[in-house]
Amino acid sequence: MGVDVNIIFQIAGVGIVVAFLHTILDQMGKKEYAQWVTLLGFIYILFMVATIVEDLFQKIKSVFLFQG
Amino acid sequence: MVIEIIQIVGLGLVATFLALIIKEQKPTFAFMLVVFVGCVIFLFLVDQISEIIRMLERIAVNANVNMIYVETILKIIGIAYIAEFGAQITKDAGQGAIASKIELAGKILILAMAIPILTVIIETIINLIP
């Protein structure tokens, strides 16, 4: 496989850690920080996913002669 | 090829289990995971499809087919491929309405791309009529 499969575990790990942090911060009564942690984790994962989506689109463009 | 299908199925199983685990905590993260795995599998399939397309192009060049038609057909296959991907992803996220709109857009764009071929066919038929 050309793509790094470790990224799947990375996404799942970030998801679990963010859920954990969200619960802990919620218990401590810091709701705003919990929201920010979720948002940052989401942006981080979105960045990785957007990178590979862009990769896929470029490859489809080059394979199916979309240049022009 | 046998090893590769095992790889794809294993990837899908691992991603499914991970998505099940995260879905209880954060559904959006599970959705991102699913999008990522979909991209990985499609990227893998693109490599195989490109080999098939190389073969088709070689055959078309050998048979002296006009390359414009082959290119149009390839573009139509690309549109179908990418529309299918987008429709499945949006359907997974629970947006069936957007998925059906994407499919409609794919069909209409394919029809629009086929206009030159259709015109040539109709002109040929009209020329055949005495």
Image (spheres, rainbow, N blue to C red):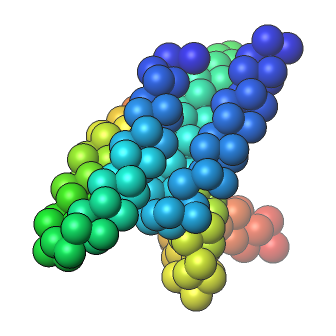
Is there any visible trace of residue B113 in the rendered image? no
Q: Is residue A21 above or below residue B109?
A: above
| x then y, percent, for residue B48 | 66, 24
Which quadrant holds the C terminus of chain B? bottom right
| x then y, percent, for residue A52 | 38, 38
Return the residue nearer the eye: A38 or B66. A38
Total count of labels: 0
Is there any visible trace of residue A15 in the rendered image? yes
Return the residue nearer the eye: A4 or B127. A4
Q: Is residue B9 above or below residue A20?
A: above
| x then y, percent, for residue A8 | 49, 35
Question: Going by the image, does A63 lie left or right of A38?
Answer: right
Name the residue: 62% across, 67% down.
Answer: B92
Question: Going by the image, does A12 lie left or right of A18?
Answer: right
For this orientation, the residue located farthest to the right is B2
Name the residue: 57% across, 61% down.
Answer: B23
Name the image quarter holding residue B74: top right
Return the residue nearer the eye: B36 or B76. B36
Q: Is residue A48 above or below residue B93?
A: above
For this orientation, the residue located farthest to the bottom is B97
Name the image quarter holding residue B1: top right
Q: Is residue B17 above or below residue B26?
A: above
For this orientation, the residue located farthest to the front is A28
Return the residue nearer the eye: A59 or B19. B19
Name the residue: 77% across, 31% down.
Answer: B9
Name the residue: 48% across, 42% down.
Answer: A12
| x then y, percent, for residue B22 | 54, 54
